[in-house]
Amino acid sequence: MFARWVMTGAMALWGAVAAVAEDRPVVVELFTSQGCSSCPPADAFLGLLAPRDDVIALAFHVDYWDYIGWKDIFGSPVNSARQKAYAKHAGRRAIYTPQMIVDGKADVVGTHPMDVTDLIAQYRETPRTIDLDIERVPPDLVEISARALRSHTKPLLVQIVRYQPEAHVKIDRGENAGHKLTYSNIVTDWKIVGEWDGARPYSARVQAPGDAPVVVLIQRMGPGAIEAAARLR
């Protein structure tokens, strides 16, 4: 069943995957759990998005399903809190898995690949409001440089995200017991490094030790819309 679902998604995405990388990548955040039986198809779909240059796909594993028989080895209360903050900002009373948030704006069921694909195409055409550049500074720093292309009425949050590109996990208990599942772009660290009003150019050097990919997000408070994103693989 999972394989058939993934093949359907792959065919639907074929043209988009072959597209030339865009100057403005779209951020897709998946809130998932190894203890959720509905999540493996969404995890597989995120795996299709992960190699794309015009998409920054991030898997935020939550911890609130750990009690039903399997503790997600990547689960974090920080990730659960981020998902709850999205729900509160949007006026939603409940959270669920698998959920995808596209560019900080749209809430989509993670098993609806065509809806996600349509949103990626839509937001990829949205004009940039911020120029963002990031660069590694040896041995363990990342330099962030940003310039607003229009005025912003509310402060923006500058965030840094690290992720593990891939992992294979054998699930022994819970709803997915007996499956060996592949996970992509697993968020291992996420933190706010500063606030910015956009009035003047932003510049900062941030600790980012190790070889893991680095993502920088500039996002409206809430959390709300992601105005700029950049990645170093």
Image (spheres, helix red, strand yellow):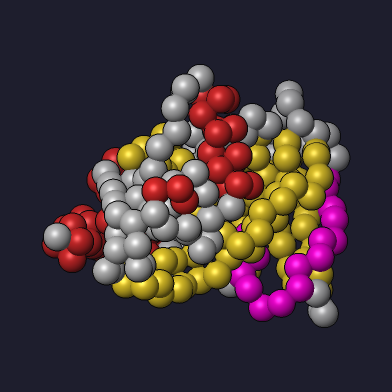
Residue at image location 30% in from the left, 54% down from the top = 175
Residue 139, percent from left and from top: 82, 80
Residue at image location 78% in from the left, 55% down from the top = 145
Left or right, 163 with reference to 42: right
Q: Quadrant of residue 189?
A: bottom right
| Residue 19 seen in the current view | no
Which residue is most to the top?
A: 91
| Magenta span includes 214 | yes
Left or right, 124 with reference to 193: left
The correct choice, above or below, for 26 with respect to 224 in the image is below
The correct choice, above or below, for 205 with respect to 79 in the image is below
Is 94 in front, or is 192?
94
How many labels, in total? 0
| Magenta span includes 24 | no
For the magenta stretch, what is the residue range? 201-215
The correct choice, above or below, for 71 with respect to 180 in the image is above
Residue 81, percent from left and from top: 60, 39
Is 204 in front, or is 7?
7
Residue at image location 85% in from the left, 40% down from the top = 200
| Residue 191 seen in the current view | yes
Residue 12, percent from left and from top: 21, 55
Quadrant for the C terminus, please. Answer: bottom right
Q: Quadrant of residue 201?
A: top right
Residue at image location 63% in from the left, 73% down from the top = 212
Left or right, 115 with reference to 64: left
Quadrant for the N terminus, please. Answer: bottom left
Residue 36, percent from left and from top: 35, 50
